[in-house]
Image: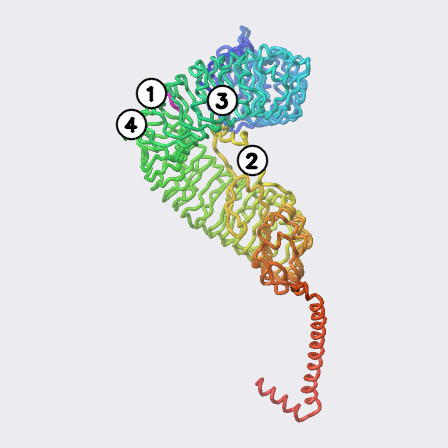
Amino acid sequence: MRVSMALIWYFASIHLILLLSVSKNVAHLELNGSVKEKIRCMEKERVALLSFKQKLVDEYDILSSWDTDVNSDCCNWKGVECSNTTTTHHHIIGLDLHASDNYERCLKGEVGSSLTQLSHLNYLDLSNNLFDRIVFEDIASLMELNYLNLSYNNFATPIPPHLGNLSKLSILDLSSNYWLNHDLRWLIPNTLSSLKYLDLSSVVSEDANDWTIAINKLPVLQSLFLSNCGLPTPILSSHHSNINFSRFLVELDFSWNHINFNSSKFYSWLINLTNLVYLNLRSNNLQGLNYNDFENMTSLVFLDLTSTRVNFHSLKSFGSLCNLNSLHLNFNNIGGLLSDFFKAFPPCLLHSVQSLHLASNNFSGFLPNFTMLPSLKEIDLSYNMLHGRVPQNLGQLSKLEELYLNDNLLEGEVCETHFAKVTHLKYLDLSNNPNLNLNFKSNWVPPFQLEEIYLRSIKLGPIFPKWLPTQNFSYLIDISFAQISDIIPHWFWTNLSANLYYIDLSGNKIMGEIPDLPLNYFKGIQTINFESNKFVGRIPAFLFQSRLLSLSNNNFSDLTCLCKIGISPLKELDLSNNQLSRQLPNCWDSMDNLEALKLSDNYFSGDLPHSMSSLIHLNTLLLRNNQFCGGFDSLSSLSSLKAIDAMNNNLFGAIPSWIGSKLPNLTYLNLKSNNFYGNLPSSICNLKRIHVLDISSNNISGSIPTCIHNFQAFKQTSDPSNDFDVDDNGMEFIFWKRERRLLVSAGYEGLVMVLKGKERLIIGKVLRFERFIDLSCNHLTGKIPDEITELVGLITLNLSNNELTGPIPGNMGQLQSLDSLDLSRNHLYGPIPATLSQISRLSVLDLSYNNLSGKIPTSTQLQSFQNSSYEGNPYLCGDPLKKCFNEIPREPNDIHVNENKNEDSWFVLGEFFISMTFGYIVGFWGIFGTLLLHKRWRHAYFKFLMNTIH
């Protein structure tokens, strides 16, 4: 969410002063390469820049103006600033190569040592690129530097102490890299005495116990940013009670560190920073603080206490903070009526506050009287329990720019009056209030121009609202699940901005065809989500210029456009559950950025095309419920694959041996219900990361490989419940995602598995905790290998409907994570291992229709299953089946009688067997002895037999 304009101007002025102090010679850097008359750079420095360029990867010709022609003046090159002197030749004093468009167009590679030749350089900005190599000793040799920004790159080298020798350095930003060292010792020599601005966000770690000592060595520091550093709780000794830089500090950011500020000395230091203008303590534990601890910070303009557990008693102590115009109190479990909360606001704060964020608390009751907040520009009341109608006095907030009321229980109608004077509104989110109805007159023209609109799951339809074409949605439009059942009108396409990056129409009943617009219609679109509608016909090519395209659950029938799209930036493509048929087009080499491809539930047939081998970044491939045939050798080069789901197709052939060697990252493999045959190759055991292996309902024969114990992922036990501990900080992802304005997500969340006999859709993080092997309904023979008992993390094991023999492994009880075990319909024999009763988590067991024998081990666990779990084993007895012979109940008073009866029955049984044996001998010799002794009878008997045969 954006800081209010007043706040932006306030901080801009602070940073402007800092930037001006960098150098009186660097007023600004020329980035457009315009000609500077009568300025010539030093030849030595020109050669140094060309050498620097040679080690870069410049895919987009960003440095095309850096010409090797000897007559080319490097002072005119993009990003280069030369000194403004009267001499003929000029030194390079500034180099600004920062990228500004989210890594889409940036420089890569190495920051070469040739920069050491630029000895007069005092301004260096390489931020927002993808540089990954740098020699810091070279940078540390640029002694004139007073501005250095290397933020948002891929650097992963140690920060040497030499950097502390840059005594003229005033602004330093190393944030958001992968620096290897995790301390700040390079700050301790106290040579950075001029440093005023320091940003080490996402750099330092919990190993940096000396961070307070290091920071204390910066006597004139004004701005300190240590966000997301994993900092340990500061412990200040007595000689740190007066920290040197405190009196100059105006900006302080400790957010996202999860620090437990339990040091009273640190508290006393923090609350005495009376010159602070900007204070961000988001996502820390400030449970010991109260709101009145901030009453001396009278200069505060921005205060973020999101997810800090600050004790809430009263906001009256904020009465001295009359300069505060941005207050963030999200995720603090503040409860009660929202009206009571506003009653506690000091009058001066009600009039001054411009940005108020109270999301994800426990507020109830009605929305406030908005006229009490005349300066309001941003208000976020989302994710609470507010109900009732939206008050019409909302329309009096003439300065309002951002309004977030989503995920509450609001109801009733919103009409023109609600926005009567709201002329500056840019961001509107009313989503997930299912009883809220937008009802505007057909000729209403809103007084605002929205850049982003979120109207998910409210009553917007049944037709497309006619006020929408008046808006030039610059960035985002989400009208999903809005009860629209209409054809997309022509104006919808003509009014969309070319800069739109996110559009979501999913979950409606929108009909008709999508027009075939020009290929570059959306220049920078990130996400197009049209799933779960009633679109028909051909899929137009221009949609493939997005990064994420979801068209699932529609009635599209034509994919011939695939060979017309040219180069596509797509990362995720979902065409599942449509009417697409025939063979896949052989044009996938135009999508070499693709990471997830979902084609399930269509009518595709034929072989997988060879061009799919060019999808080298593909990690998810979903082909289930189609009619694909042949093998899938075209996937053998896709080493990034993590998930393959080809269930319910006509694929045939042997399971390829390369699947274990060429797909080392495979986590999910589902080949259920195909026509694969032959043995399971031993190379399949190389899938050390496999979590889900389903090759059921094929024609696989042979034995189960004993190397199955190589499945390393099955040897790890995890508790899925830990993944659902939704704390304040975990929930903040929703807002963090919105702030970053980027909603592209490629992955394999959402795979179907057969668990406990039923198909289930496994979504999100839960999938990481599944450990699943299903080899059922094949022709596997031999024993169940004992090595399978080493897979202690296994949750589901299904070997049913095979031809397995031998006993159940005796150590089966080692599988303590097992929730479902099915060994039914095999030829297993012997007793049920007693160790099986030790698996306390077992909820599904099927051992039916084998040749198991003996008594079912006695335990609460095994006796809890129905008869059906054991039926079809004629020699198996014990609860819940029939009693075993030695378990026939006896009356206590007849113990001796029963003993005698037992003895008698054994005697009778013995007589029976003796009589049967004697009778067999007599009968045998009575017949065959007669034939042997009487020749005529013998000939007559054999003649009778011959006549019978013929």
Q: Report the mark closest to the observer, 4 or 2.
A: 2
* Amino acid at dot 3: His
- Secondary structure state at the residue bearing disc 2: loop
Q: CA distance from mark 4 to mark 2?
A: 46 Å
Which residue position is annotated with label 1?
421
Whether pointer 1 and pointer 2 mark residues with C-beta atoms closer than 8 Å, the reply is no
Say whether disc 4 or disc 2 marks the residue closer to the N-terminus. Answer: 4
Q: CA distance from mark 2 to mark 3?
A: 24 Å
- Secondary structure state at the residue bearing disc 4: loop
Which label is found at residue 725?
Answer: 2
Q: Report the mark closest to the observer, 1 or 4.
A: 1
Q: CA distance from mark 1 to mark 3?
A: 25 Å
Residue at image location 49% in from the left, 52% down from the top: 648
Which residue position is annotated with label 4?
444
Q: Identify the image quadrant of the C terminus.
A: bottom right
Q: Nearer the viewer, residue 748 or 572?
A: 748
Whether pointer 3 and pointer 4 mark residues with C-beta atoms closer than 8 Å, the reply is no
User: What's drawn in magenta, residue-wise?
Assistant: 421-426
Q: Nearer the viewer, residue 718 or 936?
A: 718
Q: Position of residue 40 (x, y in %)?
A: 53, 12
Q: Identify whether 745 is placed above or below 296.
A: below
Which residue position is annotated with label 3?
328
Say whether disc 1 or disc 3 marks the residue closer to the N-terminus. Answer: 3
Residue 695 is one of the magenta-drawn residues: no
